[in-house]
Amino acid sequence: MSDTTEFKATLARYLKARIPFISIRSAERSRVLDLLREVGTSLQAPLLVHTLSQGTRELSTGRSLNDDRSVTGAVDFASQQFAQRQNLSVVLTEVSDIEDDTASARHLLDVVMLAAEHSGSVVVITTKPVWGQLQRAGMSLVLSAPTEDEMLAIIRESLDAYREHIPIEWDAEDERRAAATLAGISRIEADNIIATLLANGRITKADMVEVMHAKDRIFADISGIERVSVRGTELNVGGLGGLKAWLDKERPLLTADLRERGIRPPRGVLLVGVPGCGKSLSAKAIAANWSLPLYRLDLSTIHGQYLGQSEARLKEALSTADHVSPCVLWIDEIEKGLAGAGGNGDGGAATRLVGQFLYWLQEARARVFVVATANNVSQLPPELLRRGRFDELFFVDLPTPAERQEIIEIYVQRGLKQALAPDLMQELVQLSDGFAGSDLESAVREVVKEAFLRGDAAATPELFKRSFSNVVPLSKTAPEQIESIRAWGRERAVPASGQPIGAASPQLRARRQLLS
């Protein structure tokens, strides 16, 4: 049974039972009214509806009954009707100020009591909570956004009306992908997106990208998370073969219908390891390669000074991520935002944030792929590392010689549009032993800057060697820190490179021996 079918069945039972007050939580007023009209027709029960634009009218016929468009006038008119008629239901679409004990809430409660005496019902469509004493006089319902199956039906209904008039290249699989992408938005928003595509005079395979961008634009101004622009041409990540292979295997599962198998879509990865080795860049590369929008959740902006403020902000941000799915959610340096769990200095806010985030990570079913990165592994809450939280925990180590060559080639090709001689490349690979990816980028960038200022001829082998020799990597200044991070990763993580963690080169081992 779909969510909408279950909603209609429950609503019909409430109206048939003459529940005196029914609150419907939904932002889709027109969709709720359509469902109410269907239910009222099947029950042959009179339904009146009030809107600010048309006053009070019969829902089934649209016949006007009261021209007073104010909410107060509508409530008074409903009171008169309940006193004169039995089994009447009145739908109010614009009631405000009923979240707390206010004059409006008490006025409405008085009318609800009158409706109960005459087997009537007051139905309120709202997006906000209802005052407790008023809500306890009846029942509540929530109309969720269309499910994937319902969205698929919406898409097919829209396209079928035009199949004989314009070229439509989408097949059944494309329709399912579009439904998975649009899940989480309202019907009217989905209708608008499809109508915009139809206005082009054809539906092509390439329109699938526009579907994703259109949904992204709907939530562009919603607070909580930040939209990150990614340019695929600049997001080649060298090395990390183990991570890339795992991502290639998981990618088809993100948009597949897995309900019959009883499994959830991929939830995400936690990337830990040596600073500057491509963890943050990997988040951008995943979004670009998977053609998904990338959003960044900055946990440092979540914390508030008042009790419960941090939790409310995190809930809003995660709810926004659910709405914009499918997407990649990047949480950079997650240990900083969730640090302090278990302590009392913040009144337990960090512990509550960890619990709230882990609950969402484990229970939410939206297609949000989380890429969380961490540098200081000692600050990671132990609960975050349990199996079942993230799909996998990868350790990003210093690049191996083969990975260093690949990274150097990427940066040289990007900045100089040329390839290096094999002998020079091998010498740079040796000179860069112990370099992180950011160190390699810095060394090549110095050469590219000289080539820009003095011409490409300035990018000589000597300049490359001098630039690489001038870099002092973290592995040289703090080898104990690197080894400590690696020791942690050997016991808990999968190597992102596909190679054993800490397979250090002879030079790096020699430096450690000298220091010991």
Image (tube, rainbow, N blue to C red):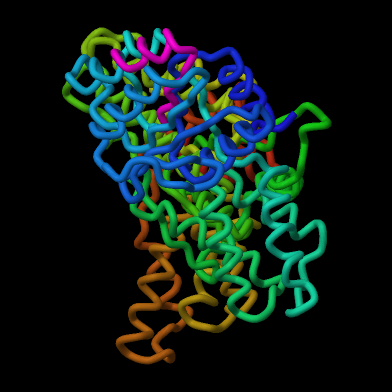
Q: Is residue 112 magenta?
A: yes
Looking at the image, residue 247 sits to the left or right of residue 348; the answer is right
Looking at the image, residue 124 sits to the left or right of residue 250; the answer is left
**Image position of 310 with respect to 213: above or below:** above
Instruction: Indicate the quadrant containing the N terminus: top left, top right, bottom left or bottom right.
Output: top right
Q: The magenta stretch spans which residues? A: 110-125
Residue 52, percent from left and from top: 31, 45
Q: Residue at 63% of width from left, 32% of height from top? A: 39
Q: Residue at 51% of width from left, 56% of height from top? A: 215
Q: Nearer the viewer, residue 66 or 186?
A: 66
Instruction: Indicate the quadrant containing the C terminus: top left, top right, bottom left or bottom right.
Output: top left
**Image position of 497 with respect to 424: above or below:** above
**Image position of 411 with respect to 157: above or below:** below
Q: Residue at 38% of width from left, 39% of height from top? A: 50
User: Residue 184 occupies which quadrant of the picture?
Assistant: top right
Q: Is residue 74 magenta?
A: no
User: Residue 304 occupies which quadrant of the picture?
Assistant: top left
Please give the count of numbered marks on the rendered protein. 0
Q: Residue at 58% of width from left, 47% of height from top? A: 326
Q: Nearer the viewer, residue 126 or 121?
A: 121
User: Residue 369 occupies which quadrant of the picture?
Assistant: top right
**Would residue 402 be seen by someone viewing this image from the given angle?**
yes
Residue 318, percent from left and from top: 44, 34
Residue 231, percent from left and from top: 49, 67
Looking at the image, residue 12 sits to the left or right of residue 87; the answer is right
Q: Nearer the viewer, residue 478 or 437?
A: 437
**Image position of 222 with respect to 136: above or below:** below
**Would residue 477 be seen by someone viewing this image from the given angle?**
no
Residue 192, percent from left and from top: 53, 62
